[in-house]
Image: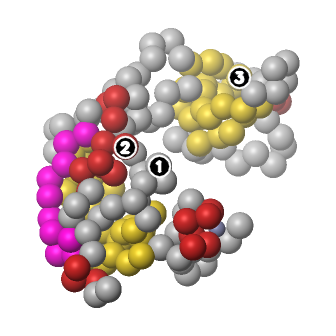
Amino acid sequence: MTTESLTVRDGIVVSFNYTLRLADGELLDSSEQDGPLQYLHGYNQIIPGLENAMAGMKVGDAKDVVVAPEDAYGERVPNAKQLVPHDAFGDDADLELGMQLQLQDTETGSIFTAFVSEIRPEGVVLDFNHPLAGETLYFHVDIADLREATPEEIAHGHVHGEGHQH
Ligand code: ZN
C-alpha cells in the first residue's frame, strides 16, 4: 500500500506538524523546532478532541481544530491547590515552575499528577489541575507522513521511533 492511499485510522502511525494557540491567539506550542509529532492513532496518545479530528486525513491535508476543555485537559477544578513543605521533597528534587510531578498518597498508595504552580520560602504550591485545564485549544495541523504500525507497536500501544526506550 502506498503512502498516498493511507488515511488516518486506528493502527496508523501519524506524523503531523502543528501549532497550538489559546483563544487570545497566544502561541503555546508548535512542531517547528522539533519537527513533526508522531503518534499511534486510536491508542489515546494525544488528547481525544484532536485525535478524533485527525481521523480520515491524508498526507498533505491541513485543518484547523478547535478542542473544548472536556475533550482536552478537562475543566479547571477550583481550590485544587495545596502548599507542601519543602522537606516533603527529596534533597535532590530540582523543582521548577510548571514541572509535572507524579506523587503517591502515603495513606492510600494511589498515584496522581500535580504541577508546580508556585515556589515560596515556606513550601511549594502544587496545582492538581493540568496547566491547560479549562482552556479551549486552537490547533492547526497538517499531515506530514502516514504509515501502518508494526505488530509490535500495536501490541505496545505506542510508536517505536528513533530513540524509543522502554
Ligand atoms: Zn514499545
Q: Residue 91 — which label?
A: none
Q: Which of marks 1 and 3 is in front?
A: 1
In the rendered image, residue 130, in percent from the top left (x then y), is placed at: 48, 33
Of 90 and 164, the residue lying toward us: 164
Give 150 or 28, whichever is nearer the viewer: 150
Q: Is mark 2 on a helix, strand or loop?
A: helix
For label 1, the residue is 44
Q: Which of marks 2 and 3 is nearer the N terminus?
A: 2
Q: How crowded is mark 2: few (under 14 residues within 10 Å), some or many (20 or more)?
A: some
* Residue at left offset 47%, top offset 73%: 149
Q: Does the residue labelled 1 lie within 8 Å of ligand 1?
A: no
Q: Quadrant of the C terminus?
A: bottom right
In the image, ligand 1 is in what quadrant? bottom right
Viewer can see residue 111: yes
Q: Which residue is drawn at 40% across and 28% down?
A: 74
Q: Name the residue under label 3.
A: 84
Magenta stretch, main secondary structure, is: strand
